[in-house]
Amino acid sequence: MRRSPDQRDDDRLLREGARRFLEERCAWTPAPPPAAAQDALGREMAQLGWLGLGLPESLGGAGADALQCLTIIEEAGRVLLRRSLAADVLVVPRLMRDGPAGLARLAPGLAAGDVRFALVPEGPGGIRVTRTSGGLRLTGRSALSLDAGSATHWLVEAGGPSPNGATLLCLEAAGPAVESRRLIDGRLGAVLAFESLDLPAEAVLATGHDALARMAEIRDCAVAALVADAYGALAAGLDLTVGYLNQRRQFGQTLGSFQAVQHLMADAFCDLETLRSLLLWTAAALEGEPGERRRAASAAKIALGREGLAAASRLIQASGGIAMTEDYRVGHVYKRLQVAAGLHGGTEAEIRKLATATLSPEGRRDDEAGAA
């Protein structure tokens, strides 16, 4: 991904400032901070301009590209921030570039930190949209949504995958039953139950093929954010583990001096760099055509579920028993990656999607010849 000298300088300053703030104000602790403290941190992030970073300049934002938005999310992953920034920093600002006015009018509140979004994917049973005399009616259950319980607005996917019923909606966070879930990594998720919820027609952002296209973009952006967050968590975990190995002594030597341990850390580093390369591809692909974006996001998600989790396992193996304690961060890094690997489709589902998007249904001629 080519960057001009000015862009590289901006990227470096953004990363350094984000890391300094997050390490000073959001340092990881085993116990989650109170909700009021998290709200206060959200307002501070808004004052720093992070929530308006990806908004177009016409809406008062900085017009930053995907790589810069993902940098903020990556640095948040380094401190295992318990609030998901995917929707507010990356997904919604991109939708506001050419989205409907009903969404764009929320841009000032988003930039100020008064509006917080959560992505609400459709559940296995689907969310049905029916027309009524007064507007719309939603019935069904969502899939797991991060931070839906603390958001002010929800982006809800419904009626897919057929274009006949596909609908993308923006709802104020009120009405449906919110079933909270505490995830293994300490974050909060929720499942929304819509029981014949009546909505005004203004809640609709897109329908039909337009809705399917926007839902696909939302999912790819959400996957990119998951990978960026996981990469940041894993990179910080590797730094912590290397520091531990260079201090801990056994048989009169540091653990890091043993060749077997060095090989273990080298493998973890290679896995980490694989994830980094695919993250950069995904960041570039988010600005390109949908097919390339879909392939990049799937490849990065697959690497997260394979190389990412393998690297986290190696960190635990090298750290020993301390990594399994609640007060040590490396075990929480592994849990963070486990959650990320399961959200928005598991690893095997992504492999099938990538195969479908890449291979011809008829197969390749050389494969058929080889089989014969």
Image (cartoon, rainbow, N blue to C red):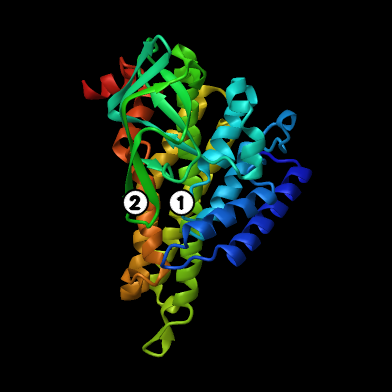
- In the image, 263 versus 171, the foreground residue is 171
Give the residue furthest to the bottom. 252
Q: CA distance from mark 1 to mark 2?
A: 9 Å
Which residue is found at the position 74% from the left and 43% from the top?
7
Q: Secondary structure at mark 2?
A: helix
Counting from the top left corner in percent of width and height, residue 103 is at 58, 26
Near-viewer residue (64 or 56): 56
Label 2 belongs to which residue?
Answer: 338
Q: Residue at x 63, y 38 (%)?
A: 109
Check whether the beta carbons of the residues at disc 1 and disc 2 lie within 8 A of each other: no
| Amino acid marked by disc 2 | Gln
Pointer 2: residues within 10 angstroms few (<14), some, or many (20+)? some
Left or right of residue 114, residue 86 in this image: left
Of 319 and 265, which appears nearest the observer?
319
On residue 239, the disc is none
Could you tell me which secondary element the residue under label 1 belongs to? Answer: helix
